[in-house]
Image (spheres, rainbow, N blue to C red):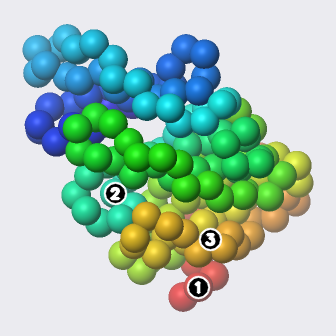
Amino acid sequence: MAVDVDGDHLLDLAASASGGGSIAVLPGKGTGSFGPPILTKAGQYVGSFGVGDFDHDGKVDLAVDDQAVCALGIAILRGKGDGTFAGATPYVSGGGTGYDTPVLVADWTRDGHLDLLVAASADGAVQVFPGVGDGTTSPRHPWISAEAVRRDQSAATSISTERSIWR
C-alpha cells in the first residue's frame, strides 16, 4: 500500500512482511526507489490491513487483520510518525476475519472519526467497528447480514447503497 508513513511527504510502501507477523515499511526516496525495510511486529498471522489516522494525531495508524494477535480479530497499531508503530490494541471481530480479508477504513458512521469494516468469516456477516477518535473503537455492530452478502455477493455494493444505522 502506498502511504506516507514517516511524515516526510514522500510515498512509502507498507506491506505484510514475508513470514506473516510483521508490517514492513519501505521509506520512499521520491525517485521511484525505496530505502531498506523498517519492520514492526504486528501479530502472528498478519494478512491485510487498512490505514488511517484513527487517533487524530496526524500520524498514519494501521488496522491489521490478525487472527492470532487478538483471538480471531483485528488490531490497531498507532503510528509513531517515523515509519514504525506502537503495540497492537486488539478487537475481536466475532468469528475471525480470515487472513486475507480486507479491512476497509472510512467514516461509515459519518461522525468525523474513521471506522473499520471487516467480515466475520464464521457467519459471513460484515461488522463495523465505530471509531471514537482516540485510536480505539466502540463495540462492533452488524452492518450487513450474512444473507445480504450471499444474495448480493458484493459487500461493497451493498454498503454503498445502505444508509447508516446510526443516523
- Residues tagged 2 and 3 counted as in contact (Cβ below 8 A): no
The nearer-to-camera label among 3 and 1 is 1
What's the residue type where badge 2 is placed?
Answer: Asp
Q: Nearer the viewer, residue 95 or 134?
A: 134
Q: Secondary structure at mark 1?
A: loop
Q: Earlier in the sequence, mark 2 or mark 3?
A: 2
**Residue 15 visible in the displayed image:** yes
- Please state if 114 lies on the left or on the right of 73 as rendered: left
Q: Which residue is mark 1?
A: 166
The N terminus sits in image quarter: top left
Q: In this picture, is 36 found above or below 52?
A: above
Q: In this picture, is 18 found above or below 119?
A: above
Q: Which residue is mark 3?
A: 162
Residue at image position (38%, 42%) is 85
Q: Which residue is mark 2?
A: 53
Q: Earlier in the sequence, mark 1 or mark 2?
A: 2
- Please state if 70 lies on the left or on the right of 103 as rendered: right
Mark-to-mark CA distance, 1 and 2:
22 Å
